[in-house]
Amino acid sequence: MKKTKIALFALTAMLASCSSDDGERTDGRVPRRLTIAGVPMTRATLTEGDGSSLGAAWEAGDAATYFNVSSFKSDVMDCGTLMATGPGRTSAFSGTVCCSAGDAVALFYPQQEMATTGAYRGGFTLSLGGQKGTLTDIARRYHYVYGVAKVTSVTGGTAHATISNMEPLLSVCRFAFVDKASDADAPRTIAVKSLAIELFDNNFSSAIGYPQSATLSPTLATGTPALEYAGQDAWEPLSVTLDAETDGGVYVALFPYSPTGYMRFTVTNSSGTYTGTAKATLEAGGYYNVRLKVGSINSR
């Protein structure tokens, strides 16, 4: 289990094109209008499918953060925003990037400011706090995806790049709850106003909290990147508070990380509080539509 503690840090303004500490470039890179062609479908827009999958599409104007991994040095950091040019299962992304031919340019959605100083300079932060339990909320704020594009050609002030894939970094779950004391043939649905999720040590019957954030440090490599999690001493229950009580299911974005193999769920509604544990194995990009049994620990 990783023990590295992720500190909170102040985020500086996004850089629209090139940056260097001394104001002059010696690496030959200049601002160019970069177009990354055919960025593969992801879940910028999330829609329910048949109950076992989620639909996926870009929307025109979706904003992603770029970070030129090839140019990154102690005195240089090229990052900013690229925009989707159209809707669909694939879309080009375009914007001004300080680059040259052969550069590796990381693309991270949704757009976020990057730390330009400190221990996590050049890293992306994935935060799970403040979820509202809806698919719309997850699509807008929590469906983190990542890929690395390669600049294939440069002509004057324009550049073109290709990308092989965009990797989802989180799992999306739809949780529904039933009373484990009710008839198995006619289970009673438990409505949810708030939900708390923790990792659970089954050997010691102990809930141990949940990492609230993780950090991704871009590299030149493509494929699924590794996330760095806060140490266990910084964990606390992951809280999801709904705007209105519902028995129609709660959507939650979670890390593909379960070192104990179990999770504990605590449901609160107008009738009381219920809790239960379940075995959990989550994969990045997975969608899990599950019904869990919980038992009452108090009632009103």
Image (cartoon, rainbow, N blue to C red):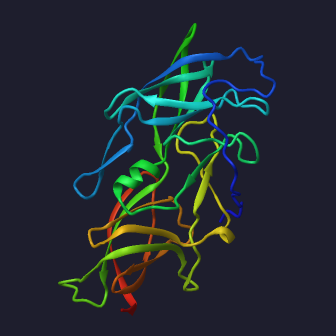
187 horizontally vs 59: left or right: left
Closest to the observer, 238 or 202: 238
Most extreme residue toward the top is 156
> Which image quadrant is residue 15 in?
top right
Q: State the image coordinates of residue 188 (x, y, percent, origin top left).
A: 24, 83
287, above or below 157, in the image = below
Q: State the image coordinates of residue 12 (x, y, percent, origin top left).
A: 67, 41
Q: Residue at x 75, y 18 (%)?
A: 25
135, above or below 293, in the image = above
Closest to the observer, 209 or 111: 111
Q: Quadrant of the C terminus?
A: bottom left
229, above or below 260, in the image = above
State how many labels appear: 0
> Which image quadrant is residue 99 in?
top right
Q: Residue at x 25, y 58 (%)?
A: 51
110 horizontally vs 123: left or right: left
11 horizontally vs 36: left or right: right
14, above or below 217, in the image = above
Q: State the image coordinates of residue 5 (x, y, percent, origin top left).
A: 71, 61
Q: Residue at x 63, y 41 (%)?
A: 114
> Which image quadrant is residue 214 in?
bottom right
Q: State the image coordinates of residue 203 (x, y, percent, origin top left).
A: 56, 83
Q: Quadrant of the N terminus?
A: bottom right
